[in-house]
Every structure is written in C-alpha cells, then in structure tokens.
Amino acid sequence: MSFARNSRLRSLGFRLTAWYFLVFLASTLLLATAAEFRIRSSIRERIVDTVTSNLTLHRQTFEEQGIEGLKKLTEVTENTHRLPYVRVVDHTNVTLFQSSNGELSFAATTIAVTASSQRVRPVRAQNDGSLWNLGTMPLSEGRWLQLAISDEQTQEVVGHLRAGLVAVWIGAVALGLLGGFFFTRRALRPVQRLANTARKVIESGDLALRVPERGTRDELDELSHLFNGVLARNQTLVRGMREALDNVAHDLRTPLTRLRTGAEVALRDAGDPQRIRDALADAIEDSERVLQMLNTLMDISQAETGVMKLDRTQVDLSELAREAIDLYQHVAEERGVRLLTHLAAGVNVNGDHNRLNQVVANLVDNAIKYTPTGGQVELTTSREDPWASLMVKDSGMGISAQDLPRVWERLYRADQSRSERGLGLGLSFVKAIVEAHGGRAEVQSELGAGSTFIVRLPMG
C-alpha cells in the first residue's frame, strides 16, 4: 500500500496536477491582491477628493461668514456628509472653533504634520484609536482649518470585499484543483494507453497489439501513431526473421547433408583418390553455396537496417546494362535466349557502382533463368524526372497472382521456380539495395506471359 502511494506521488500526473494547482493558486492570489489594492486605492481617492472639496467649502464659508457661518455649515454637513470633526486654530495652536464632537482629539504632532504638508492623511484618534482621514488648509491671519472624515465606512467596505474575495478564491482554488486533476488525467490518457499497451506487449510478447488512436493528430496522438508504427515494423521484422530462419534451416539442411555425405564417402573410400577428390570438390561447392547464402543474407540485413556503407559516385544505368549484357551474353546464347537493349543516354544516378551492378546482374540472371528457349529478355533505361529507371522484361513463365506479392521475400521461391537452381535471395537483395539508395523496385507479371521488373532510382 505504501509503495503504491509513493508511486502515485512520484507519477507524472500527480506532479503536473501539483504544478498546475500551484500556478493557479499563485495566479488567483495575485489577482485577488491586485483587486483589493485597486479598490482600496479608488476608495482612498474618493475620500481625499471629499475631504479636499469640504475643506475648500468650509474655508470659503469661514472667510466670508466667520465662525457663526462655519458653525451653521458644520451642523448641516454633520447630518448629510458625516463630518463630525471641523476645527479652526490660530498660529499658536489655540482652538478657535471645534465641531460638536468634542470627544474626538488628535495628537499635536499629527496635526502639525498635516498642517505643514497641507495633505490629507490617515490618522488615529487619541481617545478611541479609530482611523480618520484628516486634512488641513490655511486660513487668513495665520489660522488653520482642519477637517476629518471617518474611515469606518471604508474599512467596512474593504472588510466585505476581502470576505467576498476569500470566498471566491476558495471556490477558485477548489475548481482549479479539480480542473487540474481532470485535465491532467485527460491529457495523459494517451500516454497511459501507450504504457498499458507496451506493458501487455512485454508480458505477452504479442506484437499484434496496438495503441488506440483518437485521430486528433496532436503530439500525443502522433506519439501513439509512431509507437504503433514501431510495433507494426517489429512485427514484420520478427515474422520475416522467423520465416527466414525456417527457410535458412530448410535450405541449409541439404548442402550440409551433402557435405556430411561427401566427407563420409571420402573416409569410406580412402583407397580411391579419384572418389576422394570428387567428394572434396562437392564439399567445396556446397560450402561455397552456404557461404554465399549467409553473405547475401548479411548484405540484405545491412541494407534494410541502413548500416550498409555505400561508396556513392555518378553511375550510368545504361552502362551497367551494357556490362550485364556482356557478362550474360554467352549464358543467354547457350539457353537460346535473345538479349535486347533500349538504352537511353545520360541515365545517371548517385549510387554505389558495385552494388548497383549486382542489382542489374541479379535481374538479368533471373530473367534468363526463367525464360524458355526461343524467348527474349529486354533491358530498357529511361529518364522520368526525378527518377532514372531500369526495366528488365522477359518472355518467361511469369508469376502467378498468388505468388506475386511475395517475390521480394527472403528465400521465397514459387512452386514453378523450384526446378531452377538458386538461393531464393536475388530479388530480396535487389529490393534491399534499391531502397538503400532511396529508390523503389516494382514487378509486373502474369502467369504464362512473362515478367517485368522495374528499378527506379533518384537521378544524380
């Protein structure tokens, strides 16, 4: 239980929720503080304006009507504007007039400060400690007029405001906490699905499992899509590896059995040098066949995984076709197959000359091998911007619709091709090398009507 709790506390979802909540909490605190400060400032400005305007009114009344006029005005303002404190002092700080609220008094230092600055200041009464807004204005003959408005109403408004802000803030905090939890879970749901799928794949080994995709194409959905692509790729590679291992085991069984048989014959007929030489020659031939198969499989794997080193230069596909024709002309004549060419000029690609030479040789050898006597093989090169194309067309037995999708698979040989000697790796090698060069290999065929293999490479 403790471990599970600690795991939840260390989870990304909990950390994101905590960070979201802390940021939200700090933001709401700042907004509440700014709102209270702005409202208090606004109320303060209004009070200052009220004190200043009343000071002007009372000074004008005093200068025109004297103390009696000021007294009458004070009685009116006490009832209408709640101004209980009005005072007139001479230059020696002797009180000449004070409003009816005689219990209210302020410290002499406070009065002196306000008088010297002629500003409205918040001050506290000496008798009860209440907060007032006291303003001072000069009169004629060195006298001073003082007027104060109670800050009680302001404090009451601010108190209600603060209570309201606290209530709103508590609600906002609760909403932020729930919102952070909800949106974090919702945002991390694709990651959780991915983790669950990965866990099931690890536990069951079933690479057919996939992460559900939402179709939103955001970053997390793109991650799920890429992860599904990795699973699909791994599933294909594992299936191909299993099939390749099965095929390799099957195809190696014959040459290895022949190797063993030849060795047994050589040992049994130790007195017959000719039979020993024949047995050793067969063993060498079979061992070369095994080595060729393994080397070709290694080349295919390196090309498919992108680790094959390509010595790129400018290569003319038409020149490669001519070299292949020269190499296989004698073989074609022996089988009664005509070799035809339709080669364009300047069909250049940026590639590895030796590897591309192997590609062309494999296609030509394959075409001659499965073309009957009297048939023909055509080699055509062309430029189809941005591709340089090589087409090898034969009039041979063709490939059935059932076998056509699998001709590029390693060690796959259709039933009608098993009578011919071969490893079943030529076309797999062609496809791997072409794709390693950034090109693509295609096949078009119909049973009994020949086959056409097309290699397209980016133009150099």
Image (cartoon, rainbow, N blue to C red):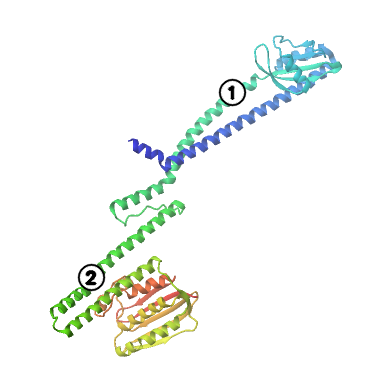
Q: Secondary structure at mark 1?
A: helix
The answer to whether residue 391 is visible is: yes
Quadrant in the picture for residue 401: bottom left
- Image spot of residue 442 (x, y percent): 38, 74
| On screen, residue 294 above or below 143 | below
- Which kind of residue does numbered mark 2 sit on? His
* Mark 2: few/some/many CA within 10 Å (<14, 14-19, 20+): few
- Looking at the image, residue 279 sits to the left or right of residue 184; the answer is left
* Residue pointed to by mark 2: 250
- Marks 2, 1: nearer the viewer: 2
- Image spot of residue 113 (x, y percent): 75, 20
| On screen, residue 194 above or below 69 | below
The answer to whether residue 370 is visible is: no
Residue visible at 40% across and 48% down in the picture? 191
Q: Which mark is residue 159?
A: 1
Residue visible at 50% across and 33% down in the picture? 173
| On screen, residue 115 above or below 442 | above
* Mark 1: few/some/many CA within 10 Å (<14, 14-19, 20+): few
- Looking at the image, residue 252 sits to the left or right of residue 97; the answer is left
